[in-house]
Image (cartoon, helix red, strand yellow):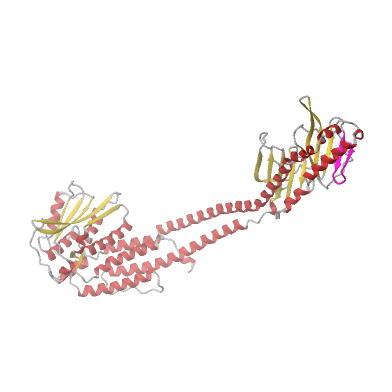
Amino acid sequence: MKLHKFRITGFYSKMLLFCIIILSTISLILAAIVSSFAKKYEQAEFLKKYDLTLNNLHNSFELKQRNYNAALDSLFDIPYAYNDLCTFLQISNPYDLEVSTNKNIITALNRICDFDSSCIGILLFSNVTKQLYQFDPKYSSLNQIPLTTTWPEHSPFTLGIMNDTQLMSSSTGFKKPSSNTYGLVGTIFKNISKTNKVLGQIILLYPTSEFLSVLNSYPLSAEYAYSITDSKQNVIFRSSGDYADSSDLFLEYPASNSNNVVSYPTVTTAIGKEDYFTSSIYNGRYDFYASYQIKKAGYGTGYTQNLILLLALFTCACSISLYVITFQMARKKVRIIQKGMSKIGSNNLTYRIPHSKGQDEYSHIITGFNRMCDDLQKNVEQSYVYALQQKNAELYALQTSINPHFLYNTLELIRVQTLHGNPASASQMILLLAKIYRNQTNREMFISLGEELEQCENLMSLYQYRFQNFEYEFYIEDALSLYGLPKNTLQPLIENYFVHGLDKNRDDNYLKLDGELITTEGTPYIKLTLSNNGQAITEEELKGLLVKLNQSVFENNESSGFALANVNNRLRIVFGENYGIQPGSLEDGTGFCITLMIPPVLTADLREKKHTVLPKAMP
């Protein structure tokens, strides 16, 4: 298909293309939204293991501080060990102590290290003598080391933290038991006269390598930096090994003092010239931070969101292309069918629609339509509508039931449905139209009331595609469905309503068909009433209509009232001069109704001419 041959000329074609563009735009917007969510999900999945590692790092350090007091409880396992330790911190020369006292202190400190296997040393600081001692569990030795600077102040009875830098700067004689060490600081006190006197601090030393073990237990692939700091940003642990400076760390401080654990969500932060994913956990009870920083440049390539956008673009392009191709093919075939129906509608019964390639719905419709035309031509040439009237009148009644205006309007509506991108609706309408016109080719002059109602339902379904401002109801007793009547008795009356009774400016148009079996003076009748809520008929109009109904259909040259006269004459031909239709208004003086009175005769009896014309008048 060449692109220059496709031109959008009709209003509905332009509107349909406009709708396609809107849908494609909405699809792209939704794709952008979905890709954004996909990016966030992908980011969340990427950071999940890093967040889990951060939680475990925080929990590991918190657990170490929780176990601090349990480790010091081992001091009380040896009698007088704690008292000996208090005595030790109050004298200037520890060599003045008895050997047993020194032994008790060494044993107690060894018990602490045995209780907490990760403890690699202990420092003792005396607030009384301002002396610092280091205990080495490897050699069970307790030695005094010189203070380099003033010993940092620690709040009594509060667990404190000292990082590697603080430990090294406190004494030149400090021997690091590990490459990087931190200490947990507790208070040594003595109760004197119901007063707690602070004697000094005991600092348990731990290696930071245990935190590296936590990190190594997770498959962390990006360039990351985990750290543990106190509230003063003193580095306790840092995965990069840089313990001297914490200025490049991004930490969020809580709005108020709290003993709770506060987890801050992962955010993107510019640190220097690069963007990082940063997240931290603040532990208010032990006053420390656990945090990580990951270079954003090392995260993904946006593959998922790009793929979603490309798929959306590809889908929109394919949808528009398929629409153009399908629209062109459907429009071409509908035009062929429309041309064929126009020729048949102009009484050219020898014309047949050329068969098209393929086995789609339109091909089946063309095949069925041609078959219908074959049957129609055969029946038009051979049939007699009524055996009780001359053949010319019967043929005339059959031909007048084929309404070209109805056909043209229906085909135009089918074309609109196709242009509107509703091939299913167009196909259904063509099938309904084929059913209605196939009924014309039925050789039977009489059908059952149930079959007539079925044809009326097809007609109403077809009109519903054209008019959406009406409702209808059929109330026919089931027992009446077997009785017969001339074919196309009710259908012209319904068509007459849509021509003259339907108000296009109203939304409450209503058409109702009632059927019941009544008995008058011992004679049964089938009473059919077709009523609507349209404009009521005036007295003058009613008198004129009654005059037309009493005339022969051939004597009436006016278009108005022709359908009513046609039906009325055919009922008289079959059932007698005293049967037919009676027009009028509803009981409340509004609307318009038509009453048909026919005898209850079985369809088979009508076809076999077993019915005798009744001389009874309509009640």
Extreme-top residue of the structure: 193
> Of residues 274 and 107, which is closer to you in this image?
107
- Relative to residue 278, is residue 470 drawn left or right? left
Q: Is residue 368 above or below residue 259?
A: below
Identify the residue at image location x=48%, y=68%: 2
Q: Say whether residue 133 is magenta.
A: yes
Can residue 239 be seen by looking at this rendering?
no
Can residue 535 be seen by looking at this rendering?
yes
Identify the residue at image location x=72%, y=38%: 286
> Of residues 55 and 447, which is closer to you in this image?
55
The quarter holding residue 391 reads bottom left
- Relative to residue 5, is residue 610 drawn left or right? left
- Relative to residue 409, is residue 143 drawn left or right? right
The quarter holding residue 330 reads bottom left
Residue 45 place in picture, x, y as percent: 63, 53
Residue 588 place in picture, x, y as percent: 18, 46
Q: Is residue 457 above or below residue 242?
A: below
Count up the numbered dots.
Answer: 0
Q: Is residue 154 above or below residue 608?
A: above
Identify the residue at image location x=36%, y=69%: 336
The quarter holding residue 337 reads bottom left
> Of residues 506 and 582, which is closer to you in this image?
582
* Magenta-drawn stretch, dominant element (helix, strand or loop): strand
Q: Say whether residue 167 is magenta.
A: no
> Of residues 258 and 467, which is closer to you in this image?
258
Residue 101 place in picture, x, y as percent: 87, 36
Q: Is residue 198 above or below residue 233?
A: above
Q: Which residues are magenta?
A: 131-146
Looking at the figure, which quarter contains the C terminus?
A: bottom left
Residue 156 place in picture, x, y as percent: 77, 31
